């Protein structure tokens, strides 16, 4: 008795950094400043993720052992999650880990128009990131007077993370412009492992 072969999928195979880990082979290394900036962003992101995890776990323990319950645990987890989202923005932009519409990439691959497309998209990302950084800067002063309910942390602190994250995203995008003719680095989840 022979097993029936699985049918071919109607969708063609697509290589991503998740399906083909070697996707970034042959991509020139980023400039030293960008590697250091990325390492700092990931390190801060890991610390914030640890605080998020500890806050959630402390909340869970507080449900089973009400005597040790602390309302600040939920607030710590929430604020850490928001800060982590903002601080890793630049890293994700630098690794194409953000939402990207790659409608014309396959059509224009290998052509000079492809380089122009990458330059224009990087310029748009720089402008967007700088606009968001400006808004975060404005919100720092406005929100600094307000404090969180349990831990009494100024809410402007979150906008400091937003400002740093969006400035980093602008830098990551600006660095892509002179290197538009070389292969781009893709987000590789193994970079985030210990």
Image (tube, helix red, strand yellow):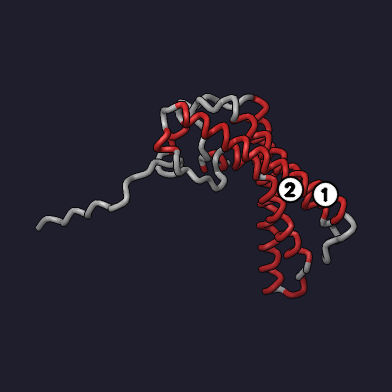
Q: Quadrant of residue 76?
A: bottom right
Residue 166 percent across, percent down from the top left: 70, 43
Q: Which residue is mark 2?
A: 162
Which residue, given by chain and number where applicable, does mark 1 sit on? 138
Quarter of the C terminus within the rendering: top right
- Residue at (60%, 42%) from the top-left corner? 92
Mark 1 or 2: in front is 1
Question: Which secondary structure, mark 2?
Answer: helix
Mark 2 Cα-neighbour bin, 10 Å: few <14, some 14–19, many ≥20: many
Q: Position of residue 5 (x, y in %)?
A: 18, 53
> x and y percent of residue 183 in the render?
48, 29
Nearer to me, 85 or 134: 134
Question: Vertical placement of 63 versus 171: above or below?
Answer: below
Name which residue lies at 43% across and 28% down.
111
| Rendered residue at 50%/29% (across/down) | 115
In the rendered image, is residue 62 in sight? Answer: yes
What whole-number distance in Å separates the C-alpha atoms at marks 1 and 2?
A: 11 Å
Image quadrant where one finds the N terminus: bottom left
**Could you tell me if the residues under marks 1 and 2 are in contact, i.e. CB atoms within 8 Å?**
no
Taking 95 as reference, is 86 above or below it?
Answer: below
Q: Is residue 190 visible?
A: no
Q: What secondary structure is marked by label 1?
A: helix
């Amino acid at each position: 008795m022979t097993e029936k072969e699985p049918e071919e999928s109607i969708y063609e195979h697509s290589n991503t950094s998740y399906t083909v880990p070697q996707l970034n082979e042959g991509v020139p290394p980023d400039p030293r400043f960008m590697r250091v900036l990325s390492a700092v962003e990931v390190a801060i992101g890991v610390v914030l993720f640890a605080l998020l995890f500890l806050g959630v776990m402390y909340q869970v323990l507080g449900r089973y052992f009400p005597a040790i319950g602390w309302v600040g645990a939920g607030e710590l987890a929430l604020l850490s999650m928001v800060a982590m989202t903002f601080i890793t923005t630049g890293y994700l932009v630098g690794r194409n880990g953000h939402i990207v519409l790659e409608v014309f990439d396959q059509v224009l691959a290998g052509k000079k128009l492809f380089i122009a497309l990458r330059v224009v998209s990087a310029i748009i990302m720089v402008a967007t990131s700088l606009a968001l950084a400006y808004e975060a800067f404005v919100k720092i002063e406005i929100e600094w007077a307000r404090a969180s309910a349990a831990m009494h942390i100024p809410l402007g602190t979150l906008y400091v993370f937003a400002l740093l994250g969006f400035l980093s995203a602008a830098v990551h995008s600006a660095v892509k412009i002179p290197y538009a003719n070389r292969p781009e680095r893709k987000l590789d989840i193994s970079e985030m492992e210990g």
